[in-house]
Image (cartoon, grey):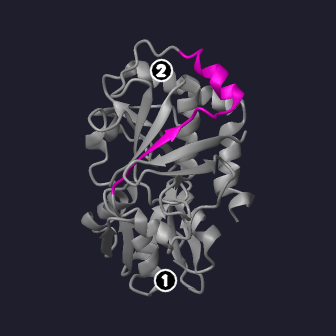
Amino acid sequence: MKKKVMAILCAAGMLVSMTACGAAKPADASGAATDAAATDAAVATDTSAATDTADAAGATIDLGDAKFLTEGVLNVGAEVGYPPFEDFAEDGTTPIGYDIDIITAVADKLGLDVNIINTAWDGIFAGIGVNYDVACSAVTITPERKETMLFSDPYINNYQAVVLPADSDQKIESFNDLDGMTIALQKETTSDILMSDYKSTGTIDIQIVANEKITSCFTQLENGEVDAVVVDSTVADGFINSSDAFKIAYEDQAEAEQFGIAMAKDNTGLQTAINQALKELESEGYIQECYDYWFGSAAE
């Protein structure tokens, strides 16, 4: 299911267009599009040109108990700079990625416009219900996070992975094999939590380099500043598909993670509506289509 959406860069007033699940590949991890993600920006997406299927379904989902900061708009917090989930297109302003496609389709189902608000990962949860209605940014559902926010049903599975330079002969069969190495990761992610636990318990002796942006981790790995990157396997797939400089050396498939859309603890009406939208998108094959594009053969 392809649909054209019109993206308006609020700060610059520039009008551009994109096509969900098929217009463009994720931007190069080291390109200018990623650099643009370092500054916060609000991007409003007009879904008036969405598919007939989504428009028709949107009217059938009850939003009576859902709470929104802006009438008729789903405001979404996302860290645009975490490819292939969120990134900027080659124009440096239009947000693209798996999460962008999914949340835009959800908004279509709900009969809402979508406003993507570029937000630093550090503090993204504090903005839920204050700066935006939901956070859709490769958010892992964890028991700790469920204590302070609601989650939608999961829309993708993920694992923790170790990425090495493509020409490395290092054998990594478990996280224990990282002992003595310098590891780059994005701070306050599940990768950070995992590796910090390994280090604090003395399980392995590692040097952790925690970055604000995942792109910085891969730049450090490519430059030889660190030995490995620990990151979501889905993100690792995206970087490897766009560059021959890296390889996945280990993926912990025994510990599956699930990503969900996060919202305020008291917004149960919105949770119910989003879950219905996701269910319809799954039954229509749209979620699989997006997955195939961003993580499958179309992303290669």
Residue at 70%, 65% (x, y): give it. Answer: 300
Q: At 51% from the left edge and 73% from the top edge, which residue is drawn?
A: 31
Image position, residue 297 (x, y; %): 74, 59
Pick the residue in front: 140 or 122. 122
Badge 1 element: helix
Near-viewer residue (135 or 48): 48
Q: Amino acid at mark 2?
A: Thr
Rendered view: 147 above or below 17? above
| Res 250 visible | yes
From the viewer's perspective, is residue 283 above or below residue 179? above
Q: Quadrant of residue 131?
A: top left
Q: Give x and y (percent) for residue 34.
A: 46, 67
Precedes in sequence: disc 1 or disc 2: 1
**What stretch of residues is rendered in magenta?**
40-61
Q: Which residue is mark 1?
A: 222
Residue occupying the point 31% across, 40% down: 144
Picture layout, residue 71 above or below residue 256: above
Q: Is residue 42 magenta?
A: yes
Q: Position of residue 35 (x, y in %)?
A: 42, 69
Which three-letter amino acid code belongs to the residue tagged 1?
Glu
Q: Examine the rendering and report whether any part of residue 155 can be seen.
A: no
- Which element carries disc 2, helix, strand or loop? helix
The residue indicated by pointer 2 is 272
Q: Quadrant of the N terminus?
A: top right
Query: Viewer-proximal residue, 215 or 139?
Result: 215
Which residue is located at x 58 percent, y 26 percent? 109
In the image, is 211 to the left or to the right of 58?
A: left
Q: How many marks?
A: 2
The answer to which of 60 and 292 lies nearer the viewer is: 60
